[in-house]
């Protein structure tokens, strides 16, 4: 319980720092992180997370969501096979995860944010 309280305080302080720097809320609290936080996952806001943490958090949430949406909207009617849909979703998730992790690393540097341990 105490660990959760400490994390929430650090997370709120980090969000306060980013808001004061004029960063967009969608950058420091994107939907996938809001979802993970509601699920009880103690993960720092993206600009304060490590590259691999951001990669996995974005890819793990994005891949199944995007794959399911694409299956019902497009691929099923096109007659795409399950393996092809799965492979495309995984590839897309990996690319999205790398792109978002790189973007968050750049935002951290551009806004001169401290390390998570220093918050």
Image (cartoon, helix red, strand yellow):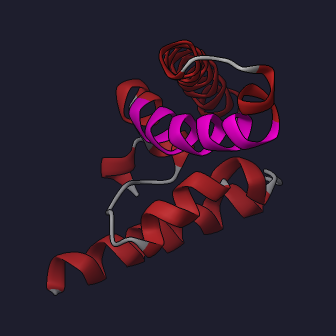
Residue 9 magenta-drawn? Answer: no
In the picture, measured across the screen, residue 82 lies left or right of residue 10, that is right
Image quadrant occupied by the N terminus: bottom left
* Residue 77 vs residue 16, the one in the foreground: 77
For the C terminus, which image quadrant?
bottom left
User: Closest to the observer: 3 or 95?
Assistant: 95
- Image coordinates of residue 9 in percent, x first then y, are 40, 77
| Most foreground residue, 49 or 111 | 49
**Magenta part of the chain:** 56-73
Taking the spot 47% from the left edge, 15% from the top edge, the residue there is: 83
Give left or right: position of 33 versus 10.
right
Residue 72, percent from left and from top: 72, 43
Residue 16, horizontal then vertical, whole percent? 63, 68
Return the x and y of residue 5 as percentages of the image width and height.
28, 83
Pick whichever, 102 or 32, lies toward us: 32
Examine the image and state in which quarter residue 88 appears. Answer: top right
Q: Is residue 74 above or below residue 69?
A: above
- Figure check: 12 above or below 111: below
């Amino acid at each position: 319980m105490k660990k959760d309280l400490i994390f929430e305080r650090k997370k709120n302080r980090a969000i306060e720092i980013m808001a004061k720097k004029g960063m967009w809320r969608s950058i420091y609290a994107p939907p996938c992180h809001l979802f993970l936080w509601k699920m009880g996952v103690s993960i720092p806001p993206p600009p304060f997370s490590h590259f691999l943490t951001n990669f996995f958090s974005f890819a793990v949430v994005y891949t199944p969501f995007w794959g399911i949406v694409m299956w019902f909207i497009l691929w099923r009617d096109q007659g795409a096979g399950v393996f092809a849909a799965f492979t495309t979703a995984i590839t897309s998730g990996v690319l999205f995860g790398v792109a978002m992790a790189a973007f968050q690393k750049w935002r951290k540097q551009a806004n001169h944010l401290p390390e998570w341990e220093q918050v």
